[in-house]
Amino acid sequence: MKTPLVKIEGLNVAFDGAPAVRGVDLAVHPGEALGLVGESGSGKSVTWLAALRLLPGKASVQGRVSLDGSDILSLPVREMERIRGGRIGIIFQDPSSALNPVLSIRRQISEVLALHRGMSGSEIRAEAKRLLDLVGMPDAKGRLDSYPHEMSGGQNQRVMIAMALAGQPDLLIADEPTTALDVTIQAQILDLLQQIRREMGMALVLISHDLGVVAENCDRVAVMYAGRIVESGPAATLFDTPRHPYARGLIDALPTLDDTQRLVAIPGVVPDPRDMPRGCAFGPRCAYAGPECLLDSPPLRAVAPGRRLACARHNLDLAGPKSTTPNSTPAEVVS
């Protein structure tokens, strides 16, 4: 196994004392694609916003986030600013709110190029156009002088990707990159990310509710619930044979091409972080829960080469009649 590019150890995040992320351990290796899945409120986005020190001041962050062995949580602000957008790029969920409405596309891409690559003058304009061409923007030269409100959601998402790539990052974090886009544009954006990843040799973290998208585009998957990782492993293996009841529930909630049965929803809701249940956080919603599940929060431990699981009943047989392989058609998890 390669040395991790980014390694998160014991990450804890709280807002006004309410835990949002609880002891997350995660590693991303050079060139790999890691999928992070789970319901809304599971802590997927907060984990990486905390790692990049993008959370508001009221957030309490503890743990270690290593980039090439150096803890970036303890770096001076100026050094951290060089890493964000430089070594690590991020595509935010909503491009319409992430882009500045009063600045042209050229100005917004130029700021990244000037800050992280030291460019100026005509070379900035040439590189900005090249980046828009790279992400498949129609009439790239003309769009440089456009503003976000003059473009479609798919075009704005392409601008966000171009800005994230402008610093030539080693790791790209894509936080729900296809949210609010129609299916055709979703497919184009995902194909684009895979093409760029192959050409640039960069690692990718894909944060998504959509298990079909993750199965199609990621090498490895981590499943999050209530601020913790409950299962991780190779994508094909995890989707074929999920070991955690929550992972099994997410997969059973997906439609398949040859299944006409009703979708199986996970009962209940994600617990309030200010009132976590005793023992396993998923226990109140779990059909397999036993007395041991109420005793303590199970640690995330290795159960097979490359696979980790946080379940007190880790020897359960979760095989069922429903197919466990998601189709590649985007579908939201039913919770």
Image: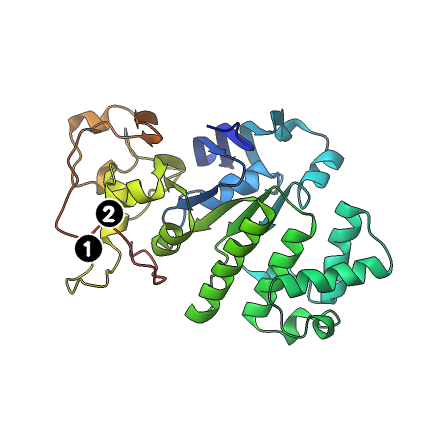
Disc on res. 264: 1
Amino acid found under the numbered disc labelled 2: Gly
Residue ID at (33%, 45%):
270
Q: Is residue 182 above or below residue 303?
A: below
Q: Quadrant of residue 292?
A: top left
Left or right: 325 as drawn, with respect to 17: left
The secondary structure type at the circle numbered 2 is helix
Amino acid found under the numbered disc labelled 1: Val
| Distance between mark 2 and mark 1 Cα atoms | 8 Å
Q: Nearer the viewer, residue 292 or 4?
A: 4
Q: Is residue 296 visible?
A: yes
| Crowd class of label 2 (few under 14; some 14 to 19; many from 20; radius 10 Å) | many
Disc on res. 249: 2
The secondary structure type at the circle numbered 1 is loop
Q: Is residue 297 visible?
A: no
Left or right: 327 as drawn, with respect to 133: left
For the image, the number of numbered tags is 2
Q: Position of residue 181 (x, y in %)?
A: 47, 67
Q: Quadrant of residue 107?
A: bottom right
Q: Is residue 129 above or below residue 74?
A: below
Disc on res. 133: none
Q: Quadrant of the C terminus?
A: bottom left
Q: Nearer the viewer, residue 223 or 171?
A: 171
Residue ID at (23%, 42%):
285
Residue ID at (35%, 52%):
211
Q: Determine whether label 2 and label 1 are within 8 Å by CB.
A: yes
Q: Position of residue 20 (x, y in %)?
A: 45, 38
Residue ID at (65%, 40%):
87
Q: Position of residue 212 (x, y in %)?
A: 34, 55
